[in-house]
Image: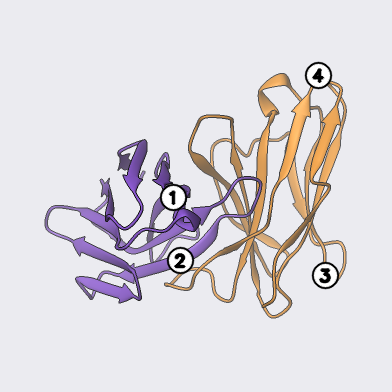
Chain colours: A orange, B purple
Amino acid sequence: EPEVTQTPSHQVTQMGQEVILRCVPISNHLYFYWYRQILGQKVEFLVSFYNNEISEKSEIFDDQFSVERPDGSNFTLKIRSTKLEDSAMYFCASSETGTGLQPQHFGDGTRLSIL
Amino acid sequence: GENVEQHPSTLSVQEGDSAVIKCTYSDSASNYFPWYKQELGKRPQLIIDIRSNVGEKKDQRIAVTLNKTAKHFSLHITETQPEDSAVYFCAAKRSNDYKLSFGAGTTVTVRA
């Protein structure tokens, strides 16, 4: 069964540094998402992406965050200047369609630790 | 925006017994309700979903019920087995939105 893959599994970064989290969505999926989960809290939506554009973003997704599809397979989340409160598990997901009722499939996540 | 509440936060059941997890949602426009299972260190895996045009859906030992009037939906696991031990998340989505709104999760422990 095809899966969403994420790298790295764990990233440790100094506060203020830039970090890039990488994802390879399922190959025939067109919609891509990032979610995060701070330890002990809910999974929270960050952003959705389709056709090289952001289709929806949450209030968490401020100017420090950006997403990109640099080639035909990768989807990245960049945090420009990391803060302690960015420490969380970041999940990438993908789906065949965006709005509508198609399921979103998640990767294993990247645990981001900001020191 | 949508607010999803999930109860209980932890649930311990004897192997063979049933487990029930309940979620409520606030936005009456939500019409898609998936359930994810997350084992330790692994991805959230979709186990069942329900759309608002049906009241119940079953897949082997797992069933989900939806009450649109009361805005709540529940996951039922029958004949629980040790491999059912995991964190279960409910979520809700409006068809015109892209995002899923998640509950806080329920840690289910099945005692052998």
Tell me if label 2 and label 1 are in contact, CB under 8 Å: yes
CA gap, disc 1 and disc 4:
30 Å
* Kind of residue at disc 4: Leu
Front residue of A52/B51: it is B51
User: Are the residues under marks 1 and 4 on the same chain?
Assistant: no
Q: Earlier in the sequence, mark 2 or mark 1?
A: 2
Label 4 crowd bin: few (<14), some (14–19), many (20+), radius 10 Å: few
In the drawing, what numbered circle is on residue A73?
3
Mark closer to the observer (3, 4): 4
User: Are the residues under marks 2 and 1 on the same chain?
Assistant: yes
Q: Quadrant of residue B76?
A: bottom left
In the drawing, what numbered circle is on residue B47?
2
* Kind of residue at disc 2: Ile
Label 2 crowd bin: few (<14), some (14–19), many (20+), radius 10 Å: some
Tell me if label 3 and label 4 are in contact, CB under 8 Å: no
Tell me if label 3 and label 2 are in contact, CB under 8 Å: no
**In the orientation shown, which residue stands out farthest toward the bottom?**
A28
Position above or below: A29 against B38: below
Front residue of B98/B81: it is B81
Q: What kind of element bears circle 1?
A: strand
Tell me if label 1 and label 4 are in contact, CB under 8 Å: no
Q: What kind of element bears circle 3?
A: loop
Residue depicted at 50% across the width and 64% down the height? B46
Label 1 crowd bin: few (<14), some (14–19), many (20+), radius 10 Å: many
Q: What kind of element bears circle 4?
A: loop
CA gap, disc 2 and disc 1:
9 Å
Q: Earlier in the sequence, mark 3 or mark 4?
A: 3
Position above or below: A45 against A52: above
